[in-house]
Image (cartoon, helix red, strand yellow):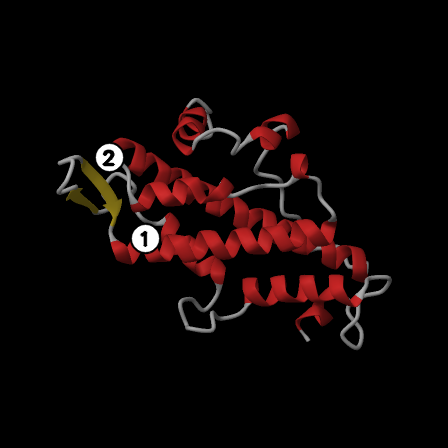
Amino acid sequence: DPLAFYGAVGGELPSISLEETEILRDAVIRYQHQHRQFLWDRLSHLIAKIEGYDAEQVVLISRIDPLTQAESFNLSLAVLAEVANAVVAVQQILDALHTFLRKKRASAFVLDPNYGFLYMLEKCANEFELRFAFSSLQLRLVRADHHIRSYLQSIRSHFTGIEPSEVISSVDSTVSEVREVFGSEPPTKELYRLLMRKDY
């Protein structure tokens, strides 16, 4: 049982319902184990691979709409598939952990609200905006990975009483008010909000 590491005995965590235990078990399996279709051996490794791409040099594909003659861009399909799989998987794991930890929206890290940045990688009229959306997702994936590891570390410490040998420090100081409204605007506007932040 993957939850044995987190203090489960006989598949159960003390004072936690079976439903909540299954939520955590599913999140741990998805995060730490190989993808069923072998898309990655460990999700963190895929995130590290995506982080390694140069957003300024990554290949973009240009398309012309035959009806309007408007030009649009998209990320190469191979890289887009990697990013899409990572973003969806990470967000689902975050959602599960937020549910387990009973985190309020204002304090919960959201990777890509409504997958707005991800959709920009699929079709965007502005090359600069697409590249910045990609680099923002690169950074946010790394931060999301950090949050997941931090959540799991605190869960293990809580249920086992074992203090971690290395404490995972906080990397995101976004105030609750900012997190609460993040995603309330169209993706392009949210993108330019991020552009104004020093950490982006």
Q: In this view, does 26 lie above or below 133?
A: below
Dot placed on the residue nearer the N-terminal end, 2 or 1: 1
**Residue found at x 39% / y 45%:** 118
Q: Where's the N terminus, which quadrant?
A: bottom right
Image coordinates of residue 50 in percent, x first then y, are 37, 52
At label 2, counting other C-alpha atoms closer than 10 Å, the crowd grade (few under 14, some 14-19, many 20 or more) is some
Q: What residue type is labelled 1?
A: Leu
Relative depth, front residue between 68 and 191: 68
Left or right: residue 75 versus residue 177 is left
Relative depth, front residue between 73 and 82: 73
- In the rendered image, which quarter is residue 162 located in? bottom right
Q: Residue furthest right?
A: 15
Q: Can you see residue 10?
A: yes
Q: Residue furthest front?
A: 67
**Residue found at x 40% / y 67%:** 39
- Name the element at disc 2: helix
Q: Can you see residue 166?
A: no
- Asked whether disc 2 touches disc 1, contact meaning CB atoms under 8 Å apart, the reply is no
Image coordinates of residue 38 in percent, x first then y, are 41, 72
Image coordinates of residue 16 in percent, x first then y, are 82, 62
Residue located beneath label 2 in the image: 127
Q: Which amino acid does label 2 sit on?
A: Glu
**Residue found at x 75% / y 65%:** 19
